Structures are given as C-alpha cells and as structure tokens.
Image (spheres, coloured by chain):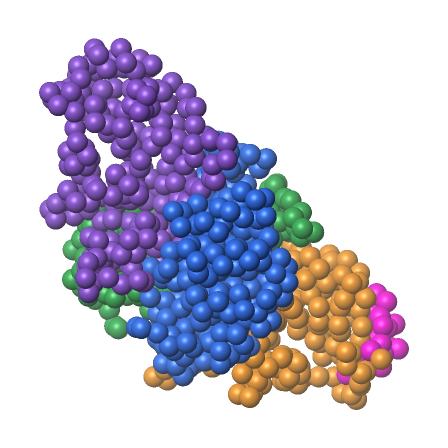
Chain colours: A blue, B green, C orange, D purple
Amino acid sequence: MAPRIATTAAEAVANIHDSATILIGGFGNAGQPMELIDALMDCGAKDLTVINNNAGQADAGLALLIKERRVKKIICSFPRQSDSWHFDEAYRAGEIELELVPQGNLAERIRAAGAGIGGFFTPTGYGTLLAEGKETRVIDGKGYVLESPISADFALVKALRADTHGNLIYRKTARNFGPIMAAAAKSAIVQVDDIVQTGQLDPEVVVTPGIYVDTLVALGGKN
Amino acid sequence: MAPRIATTAAEAVANIHDSATILIGGFGNAGQPMELIDALMDCGAKDLTVINNNAGQADAGLALLIKERRVKKIICSFPRQSDSWHFDEAYRAGEIELELVPQGNLAERIRAAGAGIGGFFTPTGYGTLLAEGKETRVIDGKGYVLESPISADFALVKALRADTHGNLIYRKTARNFGPIMAAAAKSAIVQVDDIVQTGQLDPEVVVTPGIYVDTLVALGGKN
Amino acid sequence: MSTFTTTEAALNRDEMAKIVAADIPAGAFVNLGIGQPTNVSNFLTAQQGVTLHTENGMLGMGPVATGDDIDEDLINAGKIPVTELPGASYFHHADSFAMMRGGHLDVCVLGAFQVSEAGDLANWHTGAPGAIPAVGGAMDLAIGAKATWVMMGLFTKTGESKLVEALSYPVTGLGCVSRIYTESAIFDLSGGTVTVRSTHGISFEELAQRLPIDLAKAA
Amino acid sequence: MSTFTTTEAALNRDEMAKIVAADIPAGAFVNLGIGQPTNVSNFLTAQQGVTLHTENGMLGMGPVATGDDIDEDLINAGKIPVTELPGASYFHHADSFAMMRGGHLDVCVLGAFQVSEAGDLANWHTGAPGAIPAVGGAMDLAIGAKATWVMMGLFTKTGESKLVEALSYPVTGLGCVSRIYTESAIFDLSGGTVTVRSTHGISFEELAQRLPIDLAKAA
C-alpha cells in the first residue's frame, strides 16, 4: 500500500495509542525525528515503551516524554549522558524501567525483527552483566549470547526525502537506525524534508524501500 | 588496506589454493563474475568448496569447474536446472557433495558470517527435510531452525564500478549476493567494469564499503 | 467472505490467473512464483497499484522485457529479462529475503504438488528416488508472506486429489497456505477447515465426493 | 616484537596518542573510542592512509568540523560534528555494527577502568551502587576488532594498578585487549603473558614491584 501522506506531524502520529511500543530513530540529534516526537508529546499517549539509542537529552523531545512520565519502559544502549537529567530523575525514582542493551545488539535485534529472525547468537556482551539470565553458547571456541528480536507497534523515523511510494533516502550519519526501525515496526511514520513524485528517486540509491513505510509527512528542512 | 588492483582476472585469482572455500556471486547470469570463474578454471585450484545460488549452467563457468571435478562440495539452493547437466552427472556419480540450503537461509547465513553472528533461528525450512538433524525451537508459537554462518576463504564478486578505495556500486538485479559475499570472505576478489578515482563515488550510494574488498580488477563492460 | 458461486465449465489457466489477480488487494506487495503464478501479472490492472517483488533483489518489477529493453542485469526469479517500473528499488539478497521472511509481503502466489487441509504445502521435491533436489526460494516464499495462495491443478494425471488430508510429498512449509485456486474449485483454508468458494465444471456435491477431506461450502 | 625501551619522563597524553598513532599499520581500518583515543587521530599521517570508522554509520571520517563545515547530520560517536574524507561511505546502524562485530576493523582503541592480565576489559560501568549504567557501543567495540588496544592511566588516584590479575569492575569483554598504552609503560598482552615494551619515568624493576601481576620484559 502506498503510504498515507499526512499534512502535519500531529496527523502523522494520531494513531499512536496508550501502551504502544515505539522505535524512535536518531543518534544524538542526527536522524532524530524531533517534530514527530513533539507531536507524540502533544497527542497524549502514555505508558509507552520506547526504543532509542539514548534516553533523552536536555529539555526536549524524548526527555520531555520521560519528564512527564509517559514512558514506562525504555530500551536503549546509552541512557546516562551529561544532559539526561529527566531520565536520571525518573530512573532514580523507580518510575521508568530500563532495559540496557549493547548498541550493536540493539541494532541487530531491531534488524532481526524486520527480517523475521527468531533470535541470534551474538558475541557482544558475552561474560558480562548484560548477558545475565540469557542463554549462552560456545560456538567454535567463542562465547555467544542469544538475543531476541525487538519489534514495535510504531517507528518514528527521520529521512531526507521520500517519493510518493514511500521510498526513502537519508543524509550522512542521520541514516543510523532509520532503515532497520522502519522495517521492524508494524507502522512506520517517517518525517522527511520533502516528498517527490515517484520516479524521481534512482532505484539504485533507495535505502528504505517503500514497502516499509506507512505514513509520510513532509516538514521542510535545511538541506 | 586499499585493495590490490590486478591487471588481469588471472592475476586477481592467483592466490586461490587447493581446498579453498569460495563464495561465487550471481543469480542466473546477472552478477556472475564470469571472467573470474574462467580464471579460476585456468588457475588449476582443486578440491574446492563453492557456495553459489546454483550449481552451474550449460557449458560455461561453474559448470565447467564441476565437469572437471574441481569442486568437491557445493552449497547452493537450486542445483537442478534444465541445463545443469554437468552437476547432474557429477552428483549421480557421487563425485560432488551437495549441501542444499533454502535461498533465504543461504543469504542470511552468508550475511551472518560477515556480521559476526554465531547462528540464528530462521522459520524457513522448519518441519522440512532440510531441517533434519538441525536444532529447532518454537519461539512465540512459531517454529524455527538454527542455522550457522557460511564464511569462505575467497569471494568472487561482480560489481558495476569501484573507486580505488574499493567502494562498490552494482547494477539492478546484478547486485544480488555480491554485498554479503564480499563481507563474508577473508579475501574478496571483485571484477568491475571500471575503477574510478576515490572521491568519484557518492558516499551516500556506496553499496559495499571498500573495507570488504581485497582485490579489484577492471574488465570493461557493456554498461 | 464471498458467497458460493459455480460455473458450468472448468477454469482455464488465464481464467484462474484473472481471478487470482482480481483477488489481490489494491496496493498490495506481491511475489508471484515461477510457472502459473507468473501469469497473474498479466491480469493485474494499473488501478490496483500492485507492487511486484522478485526474490533476486527488486521491488517494482515491470513486465517481461522484449527487444531493446532486454538487460542481462535485470531479471526475475525465473531468470527471465524483465523491466523496471517507476518507484522501483534494488537491494541485496539478504535484504530481499529479510523482506520476505519478515512478513512484509502481502501475498505470495505459488504452484504446488500438494496442499493439506491444514495448509501444509509441498512444492519443492517429489521425493522420488534419484531425483536431484532443488529448493530455491520456495521455502522462504511459503512461510514469509502475510498470505500464501496456491495455484495448481486439483487432480493428478491419475485422478487423485492434490488437496489432501496429509502430505505424501516432502513439506515446503507447514500451515502456510490460506487459499487454493484450481481449475475445478477455489478453496479458503483456515484453522483446518477447507471452505469451497466456488466450483467450476463440477458441483459441490461431486467435489465433496472426489476429495479425501471434509469440505465446507461458502455461505 | 619491539625491543625494550625506556624514557626518563612519563608520557603525556599527546605523547601517548602519538605512539599509538605510529603503531597503527598503514592502510588500517580503525575505530577510536570516545575520550583519549579520539586524540590519536590528530597524530595519524596522510601517508599512513588510515580509514576511520564511526559506529554511527560511516567509514572515512575526517577531522572535527569547525565553522561552516559543521553539519548536524554528520557527527561521530561522541556526537561531535566531523567531516567526510574522499572515499567515505555511509550505512545504517545494523550494517555498522556488523562491520565491527564481523572482525573487519583492524584496530580499535578504547579507554579503560581496568584490564586484566588475560586481556579482560572493564570500561563501561563502575558497578557503584546507584550508578546509572550506560554501555553504548563499548561491548561491541571491545570484542569486534582484530586488535583492541587500551589507553589509560596505569594507576588510580589512590595509586592502585589498573592492570590487574582479575577485574573488580564489571566486564566489558573477555580476553579482548592485546595492548595497553599508559603514561608509565606500554604492555603487550598475549595468552596470559604481559610483556612490557617500554617504561616511562619508571624502571622495569620498579614497575614490576608496583603491579600485582607477573611481567615479562621485551627482548
């Protein structure tokens, strides 16, 4: 199905419901779908499970969702930063659940969900606290941990440009989690700078095929 | 290390030794590194294990390697075709070992090798002859088979163009197994139509980063 | 979901393909297997906006290429030269099968040797002694799509039903088939119940007598 | 591999970074961790032809960006704006960590809290009660590269060795470190043997006395 084209970020996230699991793209500010996160803030959905590399920074975006206690659980690799005060406070108050995952396992678990893989053995984290309680196995003399896929109801992704089929291209290191998150969500909501007519993206350079994209919103941009 | 640039296909494959395991790209004729396979034929290496989607067609390339009994084992998804007579004969004579793998598991096993994954649970093949003797597991009510990575000493890959750093782009459905095979081999040998100066490929559209490429040979081409 | 219908004559291949094409939802992402299913593409309408996937790394596959459009780098799973439609994209084999295995395709249409009433599919191997096995993408296609439909003749040359209680041929995928199109009838499979949606050149009663399984009749 | 050397003074941070940079083989693909290791890039020469990887999806990373070159879409793992060199490429996060985990990087340089004589690394978590844990790419980096080198101070503020018999901090990766650069000495680790390649502002004998493990001296 060709993606729904929303006219505002608010319209794009309108279907996100309480208790939803949401993959949110971005690494630092690069690739963060800021406007979609703000719209998620405004739409009121709560008891969310969020998967993001971090746990919010300063007083914006995901940090505000956490400040307002709208996130009951976060799955991430690097929650603690110099400006993660809202997460820190919620965590110390026992008001947010944290599942800490090594960054590469996080990425591979998201990829596995989109790829229909039921689980995989990864060497990352073997012998560490983060493998505690997980199945391990020594294969050809090397230790591995069994990790499971991370799928979600929604993904919020930022890309550079889409065509009306939903094919996406990204820009530089803003690509990061976007392609694997779009594929791992039941419904991928993508903000782009602009939407071009189908046929205007070279099929060789499409990074995310339109099959993975459910909702598009064009928000302009600096590039 | 920047890739070695060979001047002929023969020079490109000169290090391939007896008993080597070799990933060979291509699906049908698209993406088949014909000239590298011919050079492999000429170089005399024997007792090879070959991983390819098919088991050779007609009287060319891989089919000739099989005809000459240079391949002791083939791992593939679709050996039997209307023109796979050399494989058929070798197989019926018990002179080639066949490991038959569903195509998606073949691709994912090759990808796993390049990605450092020790094994993965795939739903493909569950409950079939091709899962016999393999570990299985029911995860969330769905059956999965544990599959292991397929790595190799060498990969023979065809791409459209390289830069001198070894970055590659492909053309249409000739991309197929190339990117995952280059990543899964200790030494990836790539034939391209042409090699351009570094900086002439857009970093956004590179499909195989140069880190995966060990040897390049430019052979011209029709495109 | 559809009311029972019947026609005097059995369906020919084009009629079957036309019905399958009409059943594909607008905007669907579809993989058509080699053989009879490929013919379905000839009956898809532009208005349907269906996007075709080919396992060898492409979405947005167009019709078979002819003449100057033939490009050896642009082929389908059957290794036939094809064309590219606007909105197409290319990807490598692991990504292509991830797309399939991950449940992103809406419909996959396949040929079959046998289907069981539980939706088990056999289409890759006769199991005959001496046969050289080849599986290709069959097992991935069978279990990957949201819906797997089969097109096949309902009876073998010796008149036995290919819709069976339990497979006698080697399995391709378990419980994966949800609809079967044959020259004599169209079946919906769900939770072990086989519902006949239509019959063609045969009455429901006659069909029920010839098949070794219980049949329900669409309302 | 190198003969034992010694200098009068301890190394400062730039001297350490310079030595690490000189040890990186020509043409290597390298990931430099956040903190001290990042400084190594300032001492790599153009002739070395080293390619830098950043975990957030790039090969061919250039120096830190300044002024008009700052681009919010182009940052390193420390979220600092950087630049792009000719021959660069971008890829998504799963591909980036596949590159790392798959053993394609030649060298990874990391900071550390502790390293054991077996090469076990602790650098992600103090284990202190109430500390909020954060791991990022540390565990992937530790075990992914062909060679993992550590840069750290050899002693804690209270004078205890950070090169230990067994880690007291939580593990990042087991048996992964093959070389340690400190202000006082450089160590090669292999199969449980710790060889001192050089000492700086301390004699081998004094060092051997202060560290809780057996030391070999480079020939």
Q: In the rendered image, is residue B73 in sight?
A: no
Quadrant position of the C terminus of chain C in the picture? bottom right
Q: Residue at x 49, y 74 (%)?
A: A9
- In depth, the one of C60 and A143 nearer the eye is A143
- In depth, the one of A173 and C52 nearer the eye is A173
Label tally: 0
Give how far across and how far down residue C35 sits, in percent. Answer: 57, 73
Give how far across and how far down residue C95 sits, in percent. Answer: 46, 60
Q: Which residues are magenta?
A: C199-218
Residue C207 belongs to the span the image colors magenta: yes
Quadrant position of the N terminus of chain C in the picture? bottom right
- In depth, the one of B63 and C117 nearer the eye is C117
Residue B91 belongs to the span the image colors magenta: no
The answer to whether A176 is drawn above or below residue A191 in the figure is above
Q: Quadrant of residue C203?
A: bottom right
Give how far across and how far down residue C54 sits, in percent. Answer: 49, 70
Side of A193 relative to C9 (left or right)? left
- In depth, the one of C20 and C135 nearer the eye is C20
